[in-house]
Amino acid sequence: MNADLVIVGSGLFGLTIAEQAATELGLKVALLDRRHHIGGNAYSENEERTGIEVHRYGAHLFHTSNERVWEYVNRFTGFTNYTHRVYTNHNGIVYPMPINLGTINQFFNAAYSPAEAKALIQEQAGELAGTDPKNLNDKGISLIGRPLYEAFIKHYTAKQWQTDPADLPASIISRLPVRYNYDNRYFNDKYEGLPVDGYTAWLERMAAHPNIEVHLNTDFFEEGHEYSRSKVIGQVPVIYTGPVDRYFDYAEGDLSWRTIDLEEEVLEMEDFQGCSVMNYPDATYPYTRIHEFRHFHPERDYTKDATVIHREYSRFAEKGDEPYYPINTGADRDMLLKYRDLAAGEQNVLFGGRLGTYKYLDMHMAIGAALSMFDNKLRPHFEKGQQIASGGIDA
Ligand code: UDP
């Protein structure tokens, strides 16, 4: 084997480790992916007929407040000044998301000041006053009151997660800010933008170091190539970013995941919906949202004759489906603890990324976690011979 380090999975976590190991330590890296391309779910390509860049595994919006991550990603790509804004179609009327003063006033047909709106929501959230909401249902009601929760969150969440919101962790909804002003930016982060020449160009630059050998269509768990599990484990350190339950042959059971189906349509018109993402929070629509990709790059000179949309449907992942989002019910969390124990016992194997840690990581979080793992575990190992004590899955 001609590698000092084997990385299973070429998503942003794996790519960051590969790039750092090659550039900083001069290591020879074998980067495996069972797909035909690198980049994991951040991969994009230009739709054939229109040339419009389409995110093949769901829309990816880059944002971060982490200075180190921002400096790091800018080594590989420039970013446009795209600012993500989302709208939502409830009962045939379009409102701005996330919930802000514009949404509240439109919903209640009113002109409340910030203080008046706060007082109203507080009153409507009063049924949960003084409690510490642990699940998504209670957290939602306590944040915005029952009427707004039922209009914009309840059915959307049920469609997206197919799990009773009372069984989902409150943290999922903490991702969504509620604002008592007219700011309708989707993200709060200091930096935000889309890679100027597309995701794939960015990701390919990360893997371009001559010490990184990319092996596509290569499944770590299948025999017949030199980097299969049986040949690699025990020989060189392994960074594993696939599903953690898969690594242990599902010994403790199957962690539950949500997958999405994207229905692509090319429409012969310049503009279908006037924005990049329109949510559909009502139970009457089977999809959760529609993406229109031309709006992610208003600076590009795209054709005016056609536009590309994806309708996004959400469902439980079965074996063989792509796992996207950890569902994280109580049963999942118990199971994860057992997988963490197993992972802690693996010598010279580190687990990372969304699938490897069963965590809802955004791109910037995956990159940040990979930079930390590199600094705290891999650099000390390769420079000073320090043992790679897994310590289990990074918590
Ligand atoms: N959400 C909702 N209504 C919306 C948008 C989001 O109820 O119109 C909730 C839903 O539970 C979702 C969570 O907020 O899972 C996080 O949404 P986000 O858009 O951040 O999810 P992602 O884009 O990562 O799928």
Image (spheres, rainbow, N blue to C red):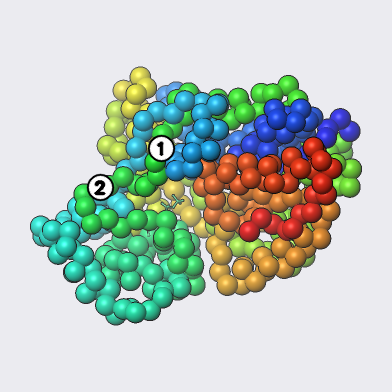
Residue at x 42%, y 24% (from the top left corner):
50
Mark sitting earlier along the chain (1/2)? 2
Q: Is mark 2 within 8 Å of ligand 1?
A: no
Label 1: few (<14), some (14–19) or many (≥20) C-alpha neighbours in 10 Å: many
Q: Quadrant of the N terminus?
A: top right
C-alpha span from label 1 to label 2: 15 Å
Q: Which residue is mark 1?
A: 192
Q: What percent of the width, then of the height, locates residue 295?
A: 34, 33
- Foreground pick, 7 / 67: 67
The answer to whether residue 287 is left or right of residue 233 is left
Q: Amino acid at mark 2?
A: Asp
Residue at x 74%, y 37% (from the top left corner):
32
Label 2: few (<14), some (14–19) or many (≥20) C-alpha neighbours in 10 Å: some
Q: Which residue is mark 2?
A: 183
Circle 2: element type: loop
- Foreground pick, 59 / 105: 105
Q: Amino acid at mark 1?
A: Glu
The answer to whether residue 115 is left or right of residue 139 is left
Circle 1: element type: strand
Q: Quadrant of ligand 1?
A: bottom left
Q: Residue furthest left?
A: 111
Residue at x 41%, y 61% (from the top left corner):
173
Query: Which mark, by number, is residue 316?
Result: none
Residue at x 77%, y 60% (from the top left corner):
344
Q: What percent of the width, then of the height, locates residue 156?
A: 38, 60
Numbered label tally:
2
Residue 178 visible, this orientation: yes
Q: What percent of the width, then of the height, locates residue 17?
A: 68, 38
Residue 46 visible, this orientation: no
